[in-house]
Image (cartoon, rainbow, N blue to C red):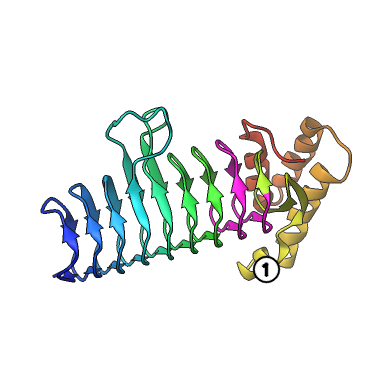
Amino acid sequence: MPDVHPTAIIDPGAELGNGVQVGPLSVIGADVTIGDDTVIESHVVIKGVTEIGADNRIFQFSSIGEETSDQKYNGESTKLVVGDRNIFREGVTVHRGTVQDNGETRIGDDNLFMAYVHIGHDCVVGNHTILVNNASISGHIHVGDWVFLSGYTLIHQFVRIGSYAFLGAGAYLNQDLPAYVMAAGHPAVPRTINKVGLERRGFSKEQIGAINRAYKTVYRQGLKLDDALATLEADAQHWDVVQPFVNSIRGSQRGIIR
């Protein structure tokens, strides 16, 4: 059974799983579903069509599932879907999607969103990401797995960030960031590969070496991008680990930072 503080306001239409805890003065709306053992601290607002999985923790003053501030939004029924074991620290804001996209904002599993992070409408966030204090991602952004966004980073709408990428503190990213790449600056520019992050995730020296060669092919050899990709695709036949880097470049619609 849920454990709900007597001052919390829970709409009768909300569905709370077993072991859910709701703290003082939190508000949960009619179309909210919360999975087992999720902990909601005090003064949290969760509303809209919002599905939250199991074992999440949402800290005080967070606003989860609010309608977007996008001026094209006109009250349509849109959605937020959150996976399992995510942590939303103080003051995090997450908006639902819009009908101009898929009508859905989606967050995966095992993510950490530190204080005052903002996740805009129609964003897709993968698994095991860390967004440090005041990082802000605009609408329609896709963030891959194991991405690290440092404090006060700003991401332009429609940007895609590949898995294992790293963005330095205070950076502004207005084009796509390929997988594995570390970038910094305002606007952000590529610096190197996310070597420390890859080591922490168990990549071998050989794999990291292959990724580093791929990075240098694109960013250090002065090749046109098509020529660099042709070289990478030949290398990717021997090193599967290079393929995500190639795919994130091939799939770019805004162009990659370079």
Query: On screen, 81 above or below 18?
Result: above
For badge 1, the amino acid type reads Glu
Look at the image and give the residue range highlighted in magenta. Answer: 144-171
Dot 1 falls on a residue whose secondary structure is helix
Instruction: Return the residue nearer the eye: 123 or 227.
Output: 123
Instruction: Return the residue nearer the eye: 250 or 10.
Output: 10
Q: Residues within 10 Å of mark 1 (few under 14, many from 20)?
A: few
Q: Position of residue 51 (x, y in %)?
A: 28, 51
In the rendered structure, the answer to whether residue 166 lies left or right of residue 231 reads left
In the rendered structure, the answer to whether residue 77 lies left or right of residue 118 reads left
Viewer can see residue 178:
no
Magenta-drawn stretch contains 170: yes
Instruction: Return the residue nearer the eye: 137 or 257.
Output: 137
Mark 1, residue position = 199
Q: Residue furthest left?
A: 12
| Residue displayed at 72% across by 63% down | 195
Instruction: Return the residue nearer the eye: 254 or 164.
Output: 254
| Residue displayed at 69% across by 57% down | 168
Q: Main secondary structure of the magenta part?
A: loop
Q: Position of residue 231 (x, y in %)?
A: 79, 39
Q: Position of residue 79 (x, y in %)?
A: 31, 41
Viewer can see residue 231:
yes
Q: Position of residue 15 (x, y in %)?
A: 17, 56
Q: In the picture, which quadrant includes the C terminus?
A: top right
Magenta-drawn stretch contains 242: no
Q: How many marks?
A: 1
Residue 41 picture quarter: bottom left
| Residue displayed at 62% across by 53% down | 153
